[in-house]
Amino acid sequence: MIKGIQFAGIASGIKPSGLDLGLVFFEEEVNVLSLYTKNRVKAAHILYNRKIERGPVRALLVNSGCANACTGKEGIEDLYIISRELSSLLGIGEGKILFASTGVIGKRLPVSTIVKALPILVKDLKGSHFDHFAQAIMTTDTFKKTVDDTFQGKKRYRIMAAAKGAGMINPLFATMLSFIFTDYSISPKNMERPFTLLGKETFERISVDGECSTNDSVMLFTKRDEEDIEALPLFKERLLSAMKELSLMIVRDGEGATKTIHIKVEGAKKKGYAERIARRIAVSPLTKTAFFGCDPNWGRIIAAAGDAGVPLQPGKVDISLQGEVIVKGGVEVPFDEQAMKRKMNKREVEVVVNLNDGKASFDIYTSDLTFDYVKINASYRS
Amino acid sequence: MIKGIQFAGIASGIKPSGLDLGLVFFEEEVNVLSLYTKNRVKAAHILYNRKIERGPVRALLVNSGCANACTGKEGIEDLYIISRELSSLLGIGEGKILFASTGVIGKRLPVSTIVKALPILVKDLKGSHFDHFAQAIMTTDTFKKTVDDTFQGKKRYRIMAAAKGAGMINPLFATMLSFIFTDYSISPKNMERPFTLLGKETFERISVDGECSTNDSVMLFTKRDEEDIEALPLFKERLLSAMKELSLMIVRDGEGATKTIHIKVEGAKKKGYAERIARRIAVSPLTKTAFFGCDPNWGRIIAAAGDAGVPLQPGKVDISLQGEVIVKGGVEVPFDEQAMKRKMNKREVEVVVNLNDGKASFDIYTSDLTFDYVKINASYRS
């Protein structure tokens, strides 16, 4: 529990079954910082929130089962209607509620269903109902993704966070939503840059299928008391750890995934080169299917690296799998293929590609490409 | 048959079974133009050919079952050994033989196996053995990919071409190889630029899984008689049609593919924008699985378009599937989903994305992402 924050989660009927509407109520105004999808097509909640979140806020309403994306200006107007209803129920001023949605693209929110459910949702609000909220934002995530941590500054602070990841079967697009709550006080001015950087180190270092959703949102809610600036380094450290934990949970629960693959590119002349190569390997279907098959198929890894559009000297490249060097100077080092297959038959696989061309590095986490990924995503919506 | 060109194809033992070694012998020197993979990691045959092919050539040796890629300088030396043996068998000067390989990356060619098979291969040479050659370059392509066409210039000319595509199960990397033979005479100087442009219009407009092989090669062999420059426009037209036909056969026979998807992006401000968006949609696993499932899931298409890294105004985008407009101005036009699913249940599906922002366009062909793609590529090499 964080004093002053109440949570709720109910089944409102947006989805045929299960919790689908979550609410967070802040007893006092809080600051908010957000990281949104870089997709040029953005969901209505992102366009709406951007107008609101310059100032402090009092509530957050999240729904699953409908992305409210590609719904035109009507999709935004729907949020104004819901906001008015909810503001009056909560007894707060207008324009103090933020939204987030996940689900089918192109369908409008069932506004009357939601409005009808709001009184029940508000009644569910309680400091101890964090789990209700965390469940309401899940779709077919196979496990709940929450973090609960404390750290000591002028006083003892708490960080609570919940995420939903890429494990949706009925909805049409795997959306990543993450919400982080804390009673630590820091001004947006002092937190904006660090938060963006932490996002780059965590949520921007994971990839399930290389797709960028219209709805991806990461939101940080902080208290508006006097700042405890001395504790900022500690807060950033704990926030990094919370964000990293959530992002890894999202990869682990990737659609159809059987493994998490940690791809490290080292020895690059520039960090940007290492990043391009790491990202290219992470989205390579041939590499990802090979990992699914526990096949130490380094030819696919080096071919993906060579296709990253940055300089690469094949004759300098070393590759190791699960800590064992299998390629040295671009050619194979004899290794026991059967033994390596067994070593790869784990939940976590590590690949290191050393370009031996400099000192820069970059790493990223991805999942394997499996029958279940195709099954989940080829199934009809109806 | 093309007078002066002999073909051969045999089972040499590089693969456990099946034809795996193909030879083309030119009775007189011919000119050659090549388009090679843009991957920074290039197979030995590409590095070797580039040294040779400034001058006219007399033969082409192609093997399947081994890519001879990432084999270091030894991989290139192996080709010198084979070239010496084959030159002496054919009674031609050294440095007149080109190579192409497809198969497992990282393994060296079985040189002694190949050298032992060369006399048998040479014995198989015959003007009418084009099919032997076309079969020897196949791996697990499910059908043979050849073109045979004629056109009239000063005299009657012939174009014969063979390709292998992305349908390999045992080998590790789907390589595209295409060879085009003709008795039309044109100097490399006059043909180099047109050939590159034709490549951009054909082989660079297909994508099975977005992977770029270390071995991809397209080679055009032309006669070295007096040029028939008046017939050049006609030759280019027929060459375009041959190259287009081969490239479409490659997509149709893509690994595990059940459909060919023709993606057209229109109404772009710049051709480069249309291209980026078309290519992004063509490699989107969510879009490709939806097509496999015959799901008119336009949210995935517009989300992929929005993630292409180029300007896009979601509110202007129209999308049509199989000729029927389903999105107008970024929002859904009500349509019969069941009827559309039936319309999509075809070997060929057409998607048009109109950005309504200009006059430029770009189109590309891709295949769907299926269970069989994962099956083929997750299976062990052994």
Image: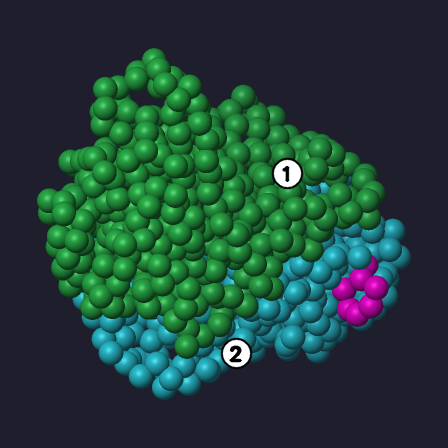
Chain colours: A cyan, B green
Res A117 seen here: yes
- Determine whether A307 is above or below A163 in the image: above
Q: Give me the residue at 49% from left, 56% from top.
A: B141
Disc number placed over residue A149 in the picture, else none: 2
B373 horizontally vs B293: left or right: left
Magenta-colored stretch includes residue A306: no
- Kind of residue indicated by mark 2: Asp
Q: Where's the N terminus of chain A, which quadrant? A: bottom right
Q: Residues within 10 Å of mark 1 (few under 14, many from 20)?
A: many
Q: Pick the residue in front: A187 or B243.
A: B243
Q: Which residue is label 1 attached to?
A: B351
How many numbered marks have been drawn onto this rendered protein structure? 2
Q: For the residue labelled by badge 2, is the local secondary structure a helix, a strand or a loop?
A: strand
Distance from Cα at disc 1 to Cα at disc 2: 48 Å
- Determine whether A238 is above or below B255 in the image: below
Instruction: Point out residue A327 in the picture as x, y percentages from the top left corner.
Output: 25, 71
